[in-house]
Image (cartoon, rainbow, N blue to C red):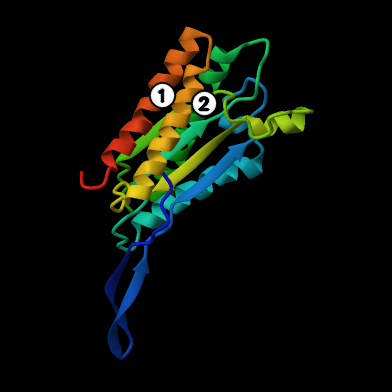
Amino acid sequence: MNYTYAERQFEEMEIPGSRRAVPRVCPEPVSIEIARFPQHSTSVTALPPTERSKIRQAALAIVQSFDGGCPAPFGRVVITGHADRDVQMGPAFEMQISLKRAEAVRAALRQEVLALSRKSGAPPPVMSKWVIEGLGATQLRVPIARNEADRLLNRRAVLELAAAIAPPASNDLFRQCLQRCTARKAQCLAHTDPHVRNLCLGLLQDFCRTCVRARPGR
């Protein structure tokens, strides 16, 4: 789920000649798209430099959110892999390669977070929640790809950073989450290949559990 909130805390900071409270603003949830995987590739090193730099930007955002006393740092990371439609290889391959792309981005992000932590001398952030999923070619960025440039946009992974402990969900947010879960389930059930259908439903379970945990009054 996407939340639009900022949790604030006040820290006592030394200021020459006086002491006063300075507000500390936690970062808003962030969504970062990393695209342009070559055909049938899951390697992050095969991405253009501009796309690889986005992983480092995400790592920096995570490390900075843990620095300075923010009460709700980026402890939850959701990475969703996507694939281009591949008529020859089929839907099962699309689901598998999209998941592998998400896993590759997770591995690269973890390495960047550790490298930045070592460089700053700070302990590595404690990431309490990693959610990895692959949606195959069910959510194409360019539905009618006319050339390789269009297909490159479809081969992507989306990083979502948020606080591990979300603020209390309103009834509206809870309903939106359930609607999204139901829509994704319908997409999974639409697959005619039983293997692909079961794989899709399995990957969906974690997201739907998030809706249940976010239910107001729970």
Q: Nearer the viewer, residue 122 or 142?
A: 142
Q: Position of residue 196 (x, y in %)?
A: 49, 13
Q: Secondary structure at mark 1?
A: helix
Q: Say above or below: 134 vs 1.
A: above
- Tag 1 residue: 203
Regarding residue 86, the answer to whether it shows in the image is: yes
Q: Position of residue 151 (x, y in %)?
A: 70, 28
- Tag 2 residue: 135
User: CA gap, disc 2 to disc 1?
Assistant: 8 Å
Q: Residue at left 46%, top 39%?
A: 109
Q: Amino acid at mark 2?
A: Leu
Q: Residue at left 35%, top 32%?
A: 208
Looking at the rendered image, the quarter that the C terminus falls into is: top left
Rate crowding at label 2 as few (under 14), some (14 to 19) or many (20 or more) other CA atoms within 10 Å.
many
Q: Amino acid at mark 1?
A: Leu
Q: Residue furthest left?
A: 218
Q: Position of residue 127 (x, y in %)?
A: 33, 42
Regarding residue 36, the answer to whether it shows in the image is: no
Residue 139 lies in quadrant: top right
Q: Say above or below: 62 vs 85.
A: below
Rate crowding at label 1 as few (under 14), some (14 to 19) or many (20 or more) other CA atoms within 10 Å.
some
